[in-house]
Image (cartoon, rainbow, N blue to C red):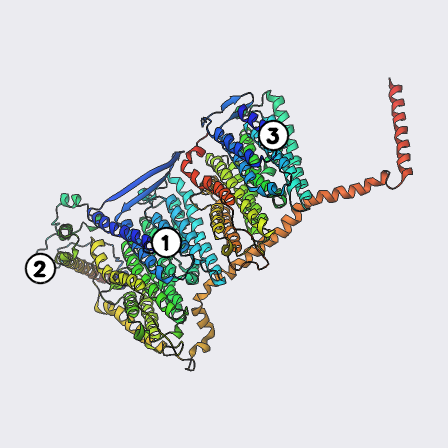
Amino acid sequence: MMKFLMMMIFMIPLCFKKNMFWMVQMMLFLMMYFFMNLMINVMYYCNLSYMYSCDMLSYGLILLSIWIIILMLMSSESLYKMNFYPNFFMFNLIMLLIMLFLTFSVMNLFMFYLFFESSLIFTLLLIIGWGYQPERIQAGMYFLFYTLFASLPLLLGIFYIFNKMNYIMIYFMKFFNFNLYLLYFSMIMAFLVKMPMYFVHLWLPKAHVEAPVSGSMILAGVMLKLGGYGLLRVLILFQKVGLKLNIIFIIISLLGGFYLSLKCFCQVDIKSLIAYSSVAHMSMVIGGIMTMNYWGFIGSYILMIGHGLCSSGMFCLANINYERLHSRSLYINKGMMSLMPSMSLWWFLLMSSNMAAPPSLNLMGEISLINSLVSWCWLSMFLLMLISFFSAGYSLYLYSYIQHGKFYLGIYSFYMGLSREYLLLMLHWLPLNILIMKIDYFMIWF
Amino acid sequence: MGQSMGSFGARNVDLYMNDNPTFDPQTGFSFERKPREMKAREEDLISARIPPQFRDYCAHYLLDYQVCRYKNMPMLYKCAHEKHDYLNCEHQDYVLRMKEFERERRLRLREQRIVGAA
Amino acid sequence: MQKFSICFISFFVLFSFSMINIFFFSYFVMNNLVYILEWELISFSSMSIVMSILLDWMSLLFMMFVSLISSVVIFYSKSYMSSELNLNRFIILVLLFVFSMILLIISPNIISILLGWDGLGLVSYCLVIYYQNIKSYNAGMLTALSNRVGDVFILMVISWMMNYGSWNYFFYLDFMVNDYMMMMISVMIIMAAMTKSAQIPFSSWLPAAMAAPTPVSALVHSSTLVTAGVYLLIRFNSLLIDMFFFKVLLLLSGLTMFMAGISANYEFDLKKIIALSTLSQLGLMMSILSMGFPDLAFFHLLTHAMFKALLFMCAGVIIHMMNDIQDIRFMGGISNFIPLTCLCLNVSNMALCGIPFLAGFYSKDLILEMVSMSNLNFFIFLLYYVSTGLTMFYSFRLTMYLMINDFNLLSVYNLYDEDYVMLKSMFTLMMMSVLSGSMLMWSIFSYPYMIYLPLNIKLMVIYVSILGAFLGYLMSNMNIYSMNKYLKSYNLSSFLCLMWFMPNLSTYGLNFYFLNYGQLMLKNIDMGWSEFYSGQGLVLILKNYTVFYSFFQMNNNFKIYLFSFVLWVCFLMMFMMIYLNSL
């Protein structure tokens, strides 16, 4: 595992040379290939070295984060063309990748917290440095302070555990059993804010709308999954307390998912709609994890990976429209099927994956989550029916509004889809729909 | 529609479609009534895998029909005679059951009159 | 290269597939074989997700019909959609649709049914919104969301079926009939089938979906998509027989049959009449299924597919002739000009009404006779027979308007029939629509049904048909100046014409409440209280406190700052003296 860290650290000087934009991306592809060749045993932690290791959960999420960083570089070509500080952009991305890699691979809960917080810094730099509108300052403040405010109790909780137990390896968490309510709330809240859960989700639409496309991709793709990963690691400590108190979070998430799906219909900004749909998906993930079922954990993991690819792809599509029309509003982006019909195929494929159409990973995740939530309590069936139905509703609304009808006549001219853009979308869609063949890789890891 | 209208008059003697005859089969008949017998053999029915609801007293015609169908595939219209035989037998069986029902109804009415007079 | 266009290749592949299926079907039905091919995706927690293919005679026969109709429709659309720039996109969408339908047909497993079901819903959405106008947009949204309700029910069935340890319902349906959980599952399956097959609460999407191109209507809305619900219930039939909800389904489908028959009489749009006729026949299929005769429902499904697809294709030719006008008041006398198309139109109309010895007769007449032989109440009986009469009514009215009355469009016209591509496809279906009734009757019914009815009930079909035909003749003679009773009974007329106001139920009635609620949530919670308790509220608190505290700092009054310094120094001195004193 150290070899990957060293490779990333030595890519940093490469960012500052001239004309190295695509070289960095090729290096990252190479690193992805090396990482895929690691032998992974599905039951235990493997590839131990110093303080790093991988088990199935970390492996999938590190793969996802490397993949998304690669695709971020591919989608931000306009930065390179306009020479808008591409060196620092690449540096930012590489540092973010290092922090994410370290977050997912360390075995120590405190180091996990450290890198969890430091990935915030680089994302903040990305939002404020390369965003498009003046509102990005407030968005950055919201983003930073929501997460920081909720995660300081997490730090204290980690210190408490270390004080009591004298070791803090994640692998040994399953032998501990803390039945303290305050500890439970303090450790869970950080991840719930990150996920985000319904009432504390306000940072997400702001951050997504104001971020550049790469910021949105990494936020939707991986940063939300940090919360899920943390919950999956930390809930094992709180089994008894969790059984009593998880019901609160499940109810908030499920009802919240329903309200958020309704709110998606009222949005005028494409990115804001996709952001709200992210929160709705994540609400189901929280519901699944909190039930403490095996199906719930599995479903949340699969839905996290599927949603990472799908939402990131949709943000790329939104950016493709934005680069041509310079607006994210639904009133201007319409009738695109007459102008870019091949792109409308990709809109449809990613939209259908968003609403959990077969054979995408999202469908598998939703089936598993529905299984776990209905087997936890059959009354949740009604909320889940409403969430699934409305997710199809807003996905179709977004697709049909953007693609159909007459186009806005104020468009002067623009270029058709570039093959870089099609490659980008293909690289999002293909893992999403092909990985269902190898679904046992995602499902059997305890 | 047909069955419920036909058996409507039997409600007041508490007789319904699925009931079996309760009186002695020989009462009121001057000749000897034979019990019905299955002409098709049990092992034939099992080996032809006929579903249970079709293993009735007309099953021998059904077996002939199936054999004829299998032989004449795909020109199945050549089996019209065997099908007609089977349907005729089913018709006779249906009429017989209708008559049994009516007999049961009248015997019950008679029973009611006898009990009512006593 | 023109010879090997995508239309021709896909026609050839699908047609040969359907021929192959005929042979397999005849072998399978004789030997009563069932083959199941499985590929296990994953197996854990004692559940296994498998991808299975079920080959028994029912699925092979249905696949044969679906591929035959779709091959003929693709061949037809080569000429019908010849002016379309993006014909490749259209044909690929149709092929995807056929693929989803085949996936649905061959699955004994609720998860692969979901694959086919979801695929059908999405691809039919794409096909309905193919033309880019507002009506298509709305119709597509209505179609997709109505189908999505069914999808959601099937997702829930997946989670409830976890109770039984396997999603292969094919194996355990007969055994688990009396279970409470099976009751929940059966209710949800019936609701899903009702949304797909457009029964009473969900029937507004079918007439609206006529905004699709005609080949799509011929394939999708006559034979495949709408019959998917009926097929699902046929597969689940052993589960559903003694259940109460099944009797509710009988009532609802009978009402659908009746309502669609009445509404078709008020309609003047050609495709909507045919759509409502499809709806009526679907109600017939569902109702005979809920009486407990699944093979009769299957039989009617297949024969109906044939003649309805043919009817849609004839309608397509007529619409082309009329310069894309679909209103029947402009049409008339076309039997003088396009006799071959009228031949096909007549054959399919007569098959629809159940004229003896055409395809519809075998299925429809057998259904009505079995209905008369079984235990019903009078209302259902009335619904069946009156709907049969209404079928004749609107068919005869359509025939009168299209063929017998005068041509109303323009003074100078040229109606051109010799488009051999379209004619060949229509003739194929016409052959099948004449022969398939008899062929299927001999093949499917290994165990024949015995019918024994009094004379008048047997002739009741003929009575209602003659009555319906006579009323159709009278109705088609209406002019704008005739004594029109419609205006005197405006409320009743609009109720019957607008499909008993069900489109309102699916659109205006529900949309407003949910959207309004979403807006309310957005304004009050997201931009209201949540902000107040987190971001903006903190800003307010900080701002107010800063304003308060700046009073004590150098901003406003230097003297206050100096005096507070002096005060602190005094306090410090005091405490130090107390501390030093206590030592």
Which residue is at 48% across, 63% downward?
C135
- Give the class, few, some or many, for how many residues have Cα within 10 Å of label 3's Cα (few <14, many ≥20): some
Q: Chain of mark 2?
A: B
Say whether marks 3 and 2 touch (CB < 8 Å). no
Q: Which type of secondary structure does the marked residue at label 2 adopt?
A: loop
Residue identified by numbered label 3: A12
The answer to whether one can see residue C175 in this image is: no
What's the distance in space between the residues labelled 3 and 2, CA to CA? 113 Å
Q: Amino acid at mark 3?
A: Ile
Q: Amino acid at mark 1?
A: Gly
Q: Which of the two marks, 2 or 1, is nearer to us in this view?
A: 1
Q: Amino acid at mark 2?
A: Ser
Q: Quadrant of the N terminus of chain C?
A: bottom left
Q: Which type of secondary structure does the marked residue at label 1 adopt?
A: helix
Q: Which residue occupies the extreme top position in the image?
A: C583
The answer to whether residue C580 is left or right of residue A403 is right
- Give the class, few, some or many, for how many residues have Cα within 10 Å of label 1's Cα (few <14, many ≥20): many
Residue identified by numbered label 1: C229
Residue B83 placement (x, y as % from top left): 15, 57
**Picture quadrant of residue C143:** bottom left
Q: Which type of secondary structure does the marked residue at label 3 adopt?
A: helix
Residue identified by numbered label 2: B30
